[in-house]
Amino acid sequence: MELAKRPRRLRKNQNIRRLVRETSLSMDDVIYPLFVVEGSGIKREIPSMPDIYQFSIDRLMFELDEISKLNIPGIILFGAPGKKDEEGSGAWNSNGIVQRALIQAKKRFPELIMVADVCLCGYTNHGHCGKVENHKVLNDASVELLAKTALSYAVSGADIVAPSDMMDGRVGAIRRELERNGMHDTGIMAYSAKYFSSFYGPFRDAACSAPSYGNRSSYQMDSGNLKEAAREVELDIQEGADIVMVKPALSYTDVIVKIKSCFDIPLAAYNVSGEYSMIKAASDKGWLDEKKAATEVLLSIKRAGADIIITYFAKQLAGWLEEKIHM
C-alpha cells in the first residue's frame, strides 16, 4: 500500500501550526522610525501617515518612554530642522535638532538603541542628499559632509549611524572619521541597496525632504537591478559596515533573499512609508484587515531573510503580539 503524503496533517489546528511554524515575528526584530522637529509641545500627526507624528524634543521623551515599555529595542531618528541652507550645515551642527534629541534621549533611556539617519536631504534648501553644483550632486564633496554629520551624531550619543544618501565611498569615510575620533564602538548600518522608489512620498512629508527640482535617480539604485545590489552591499562591508540594509522592503524581497544568501552579516530591511500608508488607507476604506495585512507583510520580509525590520507598525505590532499571547 502506498503511503499517503498529506502535508495538511501539520495544519489541522492552531497549536500544531505553532509547533511547525518556520518563521515568526517578535519585538526583537523591529526598529521604530521617529521624526523630531524644532519647537516645544509638538505632537503633530503626518496627514499622509496616519498615527505617525512629528515630535518636538520634549514630547519625544514621552514617546520614548512608551516605546521602552513596549519592549521595542531601538529607534531610528530623523530630524526636520527649522533652517536649511545650500550645504545642509544643520546636519552636523553640534546644537542641531538630532544632536540635542540624542543627548537628552540617551541620558533618559540609556538602554534604548539610538540609530541616527545620516543624510543631508532634510537639511539642504534644495532637498538633495548632498552638495550640489549646477544641479548636479557632487559625490566626494558630499561624502566629507556626511562623515562630519555621522561623527556629530556619534558624539551626541548615537549607538549606530545609518548613511542613507547612496554616495559612493561614504561608509569608508564615516568609518575612518569615527575611528580617528575614538568612536570605535559606534556601529554603521548602511543603506546599501536603496532603490529609487515611488514608495517614499509620505516620508518626504514627514521629514520635509522632497527635492525642489529633479529627482534622486542619479544616486539611488534603479529598481530593475538585482546584481548591483550585491555589489553595493559587498563594497559597504569592505568599507566597514556592521549592518547592511535593503530599502524598500516589500517590493524588494527578492533582493533581501539574494543579499542574505550571499553575505553573512546582519541584514535590515526598511518597510517604508508608502508600504505603511497603503495598508492604512486600504484599512480605512474597509478593504483590508489592517492587523492581518500588516503582520503578513512583516512576516514576508522576515521570511525573505531580514534580521531587522524598520517599520512604522512597530508599536502596533507590540500590541498585536501581546494579544496573541493572551488568546
Image: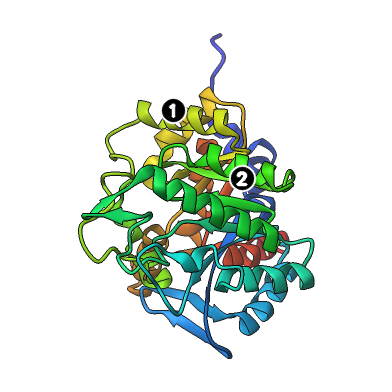
Three-letter code, disc 1: Ala
Q: Furthest residue to the top?
A: 1
| Number of residues whose C-alpha sits closer than 10 Å to that of mark 1, classed few (under 14), some (14–19) or many (20 or more) | many
Does residue 248 appear in this view?
no
Q: Pick the quarter of the image with the N terminus.
A: top right
Residue 174 vertical position relative to residue 109 in the rendered view, above or below: above
Residue 132 vertical position relative to residue 288 in the rendered view, above or below: above
Q: Which residue is mark 1?
A: 230
**Residue drawn at point x = 56 percent, y = 26 percent:** 263
Left or right side of 128 for 176: right
Q: Which residue is mark 2?
A: 177
Instruction: Tell me the SS state at disc 2.
Output: helix
Left or right side of 131 for 19: right
| Image-quadrant location for residue 205 | bottom left
Left or right side of 59 for 81: left
Q: Position of residue 100 (x, y in %)?
A: 64, 73
Q: Nearer the viewer, mark 1 or mark 2?
A: 2
**Residue drawn at point x = 52 percent, y = 82 percent:** 38
Counting residues from the start of the chain, the first of labels 1 and 2 encountered is 2
**Residue drawn at point x = 31 percent, y = 32 percent:** 225
Residue 296 vertical position relative to residue 314 in the rendered view, above or below: above
Does residue 256 appear in this view?
yes
- In depth, the one of 267 and 165 nearer the eye is 165
Instruction: Tell me the SS state at disc 1.
Output: helix
- In depth, the one of 280 and 170 nearer the eye is 170
Q: Position of residue 61 (x, y in %)?
A: 68, 78
- In depth, the one of 67 and 167 nearer the eye is 167
Q: Position of residue 99 (x, y in %)?
A: 62, 68
